[in-house]
Structure formats: C-alpha cells, structure tokens
Amino acid sequence: MKTRIVLVGAGVALLLAAPLLLSQGLVNAAIQMLIAALFACAYNLLCGQAGMLSFGHAAYFGVGAFATVHAMNAIGGTGLLPTPLLPLAGAVGGLGIGAIAGWFATQRTGTYFAMITLAIAELLHALAPHLKGLFGGEAGVSAMRMPALGLTFGSSTQVYYLTLVWVLVSIALLYLYTQTPVGRLTLGLRENGHRLRFLGYDVHKLSVLVFAISAMFSGVAGGLQVINNEAANYVLFDPSLSAAVVLNTYIGGVKVFLGPALGAALMTFFGYAISDLTQSWLLYQGILFVLVMMFMPAGLAGMVGTSSTLRKRYGAAALAPAFVLALLAALCLSCGGAFVVEMLQRMFSQDYRALASANAAMPSPPITLFGVAWSPASVITWLVPASLLAIGGAMAYFTRQRLQALDSQHATGAATANQPHVATTRSAA
Amino acid sequence: MSNTILSLRDLRKSFGPADIIRGVNLDLQADERHAFIGPNGAGKSTVFHLISGNLTPTSGDIVFDGHRIGGRSPQEINRLGLSRSFQITNIFPKLTVFENLRLAVMRPHGLQYSFWSFIDRNARIREQTERLMEQVRLQGRATTIAGEMSYSEQRSLEIAMTLASDPKVILLDEPMAGMSNEETAYTADLIREVTQGRALLIVEHDMEVVFSISDRISVLVYGEVIATGTPDEIRNNAKVKEAYLGEEVTA
Amino acid sequence: MDTSIVSLLNGIIYGLLLFMVSAGLTLIFGMMGVLNFAHASFYMLGAYFAYALQGTLGFWGALIVSPILVGLVGVVVERFFLRRVHHHGHAHELLLTFGLSFIIAELVKLFFGNFPVNYRIPKSLDFAAFTIGNSDYPIYRVMMGAVAIAMFVVIYLLLTRTRVGIVVRSAIYKPRMAEALGHNVPMVFMGVFGIGAALAGLAGAVAGAFYTTNPNMAIELGVMVFVVVVVGGLASLGGAMLASLLIGVVTSFAVGIDATLADLFAVMGAREWAEATGGLLTLKVSSLAATIPFALMLLILLVRPTGLFGEKA
C-alpha cells in the first residue's frame, strides 16, 4: 500500500516538474498524453469496471468539446465561467448526452450494447456536418482562451498546468468513485447484473448512471482538448477516436485502475514520437492490441503485476534469465516486424511505384531504410527480418518453456517441503 | 385466521405448445415452512421463476402480501419483501465473499444510487455483512474470491445473499445440493433458525431435510400440485406414493 | 412516379446488398455467439482483392477468385485467432475481431493507399437493363440484386435440404450435442466462418465496382449492418432480410426528398418560426438520409428492444 502511495506521489511530482524539464514541443505532447489518459480512465469506468463495452465513446468526448467551445465563445472572459472552469461545460455536455444515449444503449447488454454505442456515435458523426449552427460544418467552431485569474493562458505551460489539475482531480474523483456504494455496484454489474435484479436493484437505472458518469468525465477530456486547440470540429466524432480509446485502454490493462491511463499516455507518446519516422503507426498499434488480446489479456499494467508476482514466487535470480530472454525476444520481434512493415509501406507507396514504373531497366530500385539501401528484389532484404522474426519467435518459445519449468520445479518443491511434516505426525501418532 | 402471505391461483406457464405449469394452486402462510417436492422436471424451479419475476405467467394469479406480482420485474418483487436463491449458483464470481454479501446488504439500506459516501466507512453495513458471513460459517473466507471456493461454500454464500434483505418470504431452490451430511445438518438448522417468523418455500430432494423442516409439503408432478398437507399426510397419500413409485420415501 | 419506382428499386437492391453481408454475420453470431467486427472488413477485402486481380484475371475471373481468397482469410482468422481466445469469453472475442478489423483497414491503406481506388464496372456491363420513364436503369444494379437473391436461395437450400446443412444447423443450435454425436464441430465452425466471410467478400467484389472502393468501406457498411442486426433481431435471417430492405428503401427514398421539417410546420402555419429557429428544422430530409437508419434503430430500442423478429427477453 505504502509503495503505491510513494509511486503515485513521485508520479505527480514528476508531472508538476515536467514543463521545467521538457521542450515546448514535448510539453504539448504531454498535454495530449494527459487528455488521452483521462479519456481512457473515464472509458474504463464503463468497460473495465461495469463490463459494458462501448465502441462509440468519442461521441461524449466530442459533445464535451463542442459544449466547451460554445461556452468559450458565449461566456468566456465575461467572468461567468473563467477559463480554468470551462471544462465544467464539457462535463455538463457529456453528462447530458451520456444520460440520454445511455438510456437507449443500456436497454440491451453485451454485443448489442456495443453495436448501439457504435451506431449512436456514427449518428452524431453523420449529423454533425449538417448542423452548422452547433457544429460549424466542415470548418468546425473555434474560440479563444480568455485571460483569467491574472493568467493569460497564452503559453503552453499554463495550459499544461490547467490540464494537469483537471486530469489529476478527475482521476482522483474516479478513484474515489470506486470506493462508494455505486462504485462497488458497478463491479456487480460486470460480474452478474442478472443477480443484482433479484437483490432489488434497478439494473437499467444503475447502468444509465454509470454510463452518464463515464460520459461526463469523457466530456471533461473533450473540453480540455478544446481549451488546448482552441477549436472543435466534427472530426472529433470519428470512429477512429473511439477505436483509439479502446486500444489504449486494453493495451494498458483494464484490471488495474491506472492501467488505461498509462496505456493511453504511452500510446499517445509513441504516436507523437514515432509519427515522423513512420506512416504506419496505427498499424503497429493495432498489431500490439491484437498481440495483447491474444497473449497478455491483462495488458501492460497487468504484465507488471504478473512479473512482480513471479519474482516473489521464484526469486529474482531464477527469473532473471527468463526475463532477459523475454526482453530480447520482444526486441527481435519488434525489429523484424517493423522492418517488414516499413519495407512494404515504401514499396507500395505511390512515389515508389511511379519510380519503379518510370525506369524499365530497374524494376525495383533500392529503398533506404535505417540508413542502408535495400533492394526489394534481393533475397537478403527479406532474409534479415525473417531471421529476426524467427529468432525472436524461438526466444519467446524458450521463455515460455523456462517459465513452465520454473512452475513445475516450484510445485514439486512445495510437495517435497510437505513430506517431512507428514513423517513427523505419523511418527508422533 | 387466514394468514396467507403468498398465494398462487391457477398458475399456468407455457413455452409455445409445451405446457410446463398447468394450473398450480398454493397458499403459503406468513410463518410456515413449506416444502415443494416432486420428480425431476416437474416444474418446481419454473414456479420459482414465475414467483420471483424471472418469467411471466401465461395465465393465473400470484398474490404476495396483497400485491399482484405476476409479470412484475424481479427488483420490484424483491423490494416488496420476497427473496430467492438459485439452483445454479448465481453469485459474483470474481469478487470476494465479503464483497458479494455487501452488495446484497447495501440495497435494503437504500444505498443503490449513493456515490457521495465511502462504503468502507459504513460500520452498519460492515457489521451486518460480517454477521451474515458468520451465520453461514464463511467468516474465514471473507477475502476469498467467491468463484474459487468449493461448491458447497458457494451454496452457503448463495443462501446468505438471499437472507440479506430481511425478506418476508424466502424461496430456496435446492440450497443443500452438493453438501456433505454435516453441512446439510448445519444448514438445515440455519434455515430453521433464520426462517423463524418468516415464510419459507423450499425445493429440496433430501427427504430427511424436507420432512424435518417443513410444516407442510406440496407435491408437484407434471406442472400440477397433486397433494398438499402435513408431512404425515403426504407420507400416507396414495397419489404421492404412486408418483414416487419405486423411490424410497424415508420416514 | 418514375422517380419513386427508381428509388424503390435502388432501395431494394441496396437492402439486398446489406442483407448479403448481414446474413453471414447473423449466421456466425447464431453459431458462435460472437459478433465478428471484422465481417465488414471481409466485405472490403472482397472489393480490394477483386480490384487487384482484375488486371490478371479479368472482371469475371476476379469476381470468382476474390471471394475464395476472402474465405481463406476468414478460415485463418477463425483457426488462428478466434479459437485461441474463445475461452476468455464473448467480450474478449469481440475485442479481438475489433482489433483485426482495425489491422485489416490499416493493411489496406498500406498496400493500396489511403484513398479510393479505381475499381470500375467493366464497359461490357455498363448498359441499361430497361428504361423507366426517361431514365435508364443500369444492368449492374439488377445484377447486384440478382446475386443477392441467388445467394439467399443457395444458403436457404443448403441449410435446409442438404446433410451438411443439417449438421451446420445443429452445430449452430447445440454445438456440444452435435460434437457428442461425432460431428467435427470445430471444422464446421471453421467452414461456416469461411463461407460467411466469402459471402461478404462476394458482396464487396460485386458492390465495390459500383459504389466506391476505399479504406473506409468497412466501417461505413459495418455500422449499417449492425443497425440491421439490432433492428431485425440477431439470429434471425428473416429479421435481417426485413430490416435490410426497410433500411435500404427508406434511405433510398429519403435521399430524394428535399422537404424539411419546416415544411411540415408550414401545414400548421408556423413555417416562419420554424425557419427562423433553424437547426434540425431546416435540414433537408435528403441531407439526413444517412442518419435515418440510426433513428430507426433508436426507435426500435424504445418500442421493441429485442428487434422486430427477436425473442421477447
């Protein structure tokens, strides 16, 4: 328990110190990471805790964003709602639309529920460009951050701290929520909503409440996005945004409270850092998601938990070789995979195809990757990633063997430990 | 003086062309323990589903404490004071035993929409939950994940959850299934104790339990009640003996 | 009148197209209890494979080979991905298929670019079937409808008249029992999944030439298919057919209507107020055409949550 508080405290201190340590560009990225983390945390309330898989959560993020941008235009600067309090508009928007949408969506459960949430988001996405008054058509709606409380909110740093405060407070509230009666009932909804009925609960009303709260905090995240960008556009309702939060949440891990937040922060950071290097960032994210769902369902946060459990069980010394092997396997597989994807991406790009067809003598000109020129036609080009993938795969296989061996050793060790005890009781009798 | 708290009048349930419950009549007194026996497939669980709101009657009346509850939702019926357990254990598998019971305890205290207080701080809820755990002898399993317990422990949890709302009528569907002799005896005593002053309708196959606990017994065969009476009357009833022909009815 | 007939025909054919894709989804859901998010991705793959093969095999060759390839993809997805996570539960499978649909879309963008491709009807098929009023009705549209109807008839006959069909139906209804009776149920699952995928692929190959072929096809159609399934009731082929046709026809008619809600208010003499209020009231029905299916879905949820043909919960 204490280590957890220390870790959280350290994390918060780091976040507070960030603008002093990072460049402006990175501070902007940090703002995006914080917003994504809050959105994922709000989303996890519905999907990880209540067990209701929503595929259209961008709707509430978007509604919060538009509510905030209109509030900025209407009353920003008049003192009614000073800039720091503007995300409240996002909260109200998210809560309202969330309650209505939730009423419809929670009429069904499971797969149907997922489909309905997707359809509601698509409804907004299709409707928004036509309602020019509300959503500003193709161009969207823009606003300006107004000074308040002696601050101009002109620099990224000030926006960063505003975002940080809101995100920390919201996540803290979401955590406290899990300690309330409704918070525990949320878990009950996931585990056995049917039984809750027979215990006297109105499951539909409860579901709507949970949905609305999740939408409310999503709206806050949307509001923060608008304060940062000073604009909102109907693109915010795009299915890719809903998909992103699903991927982030599960990659992070839904069983741990901060899992989704960390997953979202990590993915957003990689998206920011790597998007200059590759056009296929989304593909990597999708592959990571599928790998997580197939081999590490508890997500990255869950993996941290599992490895510490394993360390306690087998001891650091016994675990170290398997750990190193796993790390190397991950490295090889990532490199091999990235090589293939990047090569393919360049090979099939329009520029390359134009180049290739232009020069009949050289049907497959070399592609520069990682500073070296590789010819797509040569075997070696494909042998490199193939061997990386093979080595990585073999290492992963050996890691699993090692872990299984440790497990059976541990089991027999426990059995032998029991035998002397039996002998003494028998001799005593 | 008639003290009927639950009455079924010509209750019928059909699934398409299949008539499962074909006119059941039953009167449950407010302080009696009433056993519901019959061969497998007679429809006993179906009657429970009809009473508790899991199924809607095709026709007929169910009157509980002056309210007509046929076709109402399970939560309404539970709030009126009727609580049931399930034949197939219906708990919250990945939550701890304590959590499971606490969820059952919270509702009667009106906490179903409360998100402004911390549940751990609520001493009353904690005490009641602990008391329930002790009653079913699960106090040592408070932090165990419910789905990882043995089958009979899960049955005990199931019973505890049913009792949490302090109901006027309790419906127990094969509560002792899977229990050892000692556990069965303990649970039978427990049931007798907690149903003091309440109405109990219990489905059980263990005839020793049935004959020792119940004030009256109803026999359901092919969706109809063929006999209702005290244990002695039922033991000597010709129709009942015929229905159970070949089965041993323990004295 | 003529435009109405054209709209009706267009609507029916679009509805039949929706049905082609949602029928496979319905069958797979009924059998495995998992909603295959990637089903619409198979539709997209059908179009893209056909486009890629058109050069070497010609239009008709591509039309035949493409669904087979998509069927193979479906088999691989079932055997190597879905089967592995089956024990984690339905939500997990749903998420996995979601991830797969995401990857398929990104792969399509990688290989073919993030823009529509030029998959066109061949000149040989670009003529009118008949004339209604003064507009020609393209033969290709009729062909699309014919393929859908043929497909429906074939599936129906296969399922009800052949031995394989009976085994499949029993595996859908009671997989464990079918397995206990000695049928190779995992093989049946793989087969049905593959065939469902192939049908979606066929729909894509046929429709992609007429409508656009772009990386967003999957999500655009996918959402419609989900609406069909919610409106019609999952696990009901009849419901899927009815809902598909309903949505197809309503959307088709709506596109041709330029009236607005303000016109409705005009009947009550409140036109000026309605037009001054703006917003939803001055939106033309034609602009809203895309959103009508969603409104229909919400209406069904309000009035009959299990869908038109669904079982009463």
Image: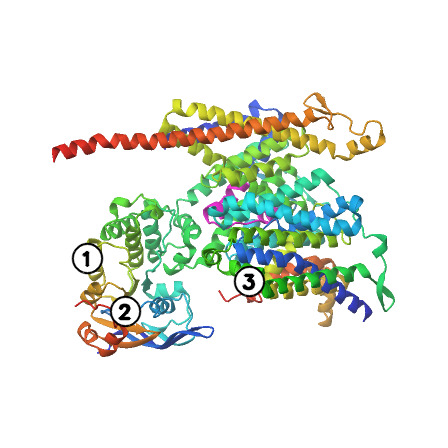
Farthest residue, direction left: A429
Q: Residue at x 29, y 32 (%)?
A: A414
Q: Which residue is mark 1?
A: B185
Q: Chain of mark 3?
A: C
Is residue A235 shown in magenta? no
**Label 2 Cα neighbours within 10 Å, binned few <14 / some 14-19 / many ≥20:** many
Between the residue at mark 2 and the residue at mark 3, the CA separation in whole angstroms equals 39 Å
Q: Would residue B200 be found to the left or right of residue A191 on screen?
A: left
**Amino acid at the residue labelled 2:** Ile
Q: Which mark is residue B37?
A: 2
* Residue A291 image offset from top left, x and y in percent: 54, 37
Disc 2 and disc 3 in contact, CB within 8 angstroms: no
Indicate the secondary structure of the residue bearing disc 3.
Answer: helix
Horizontal side, residue A349 vs residue B114: left or right = right
Chain of the residue that carries numbered disc 1 in the rendered image = B
In this picture, residue C43 sits left or right of residue C120: left
Residue C166's disc is 3
Q: How busy is the neighbourhood of tag 1: few (under 14 within 10 Å), some, or many (20 plus)?
A: some
Q: Which residues, given as a range, are shown in magenta?
A: A38-66
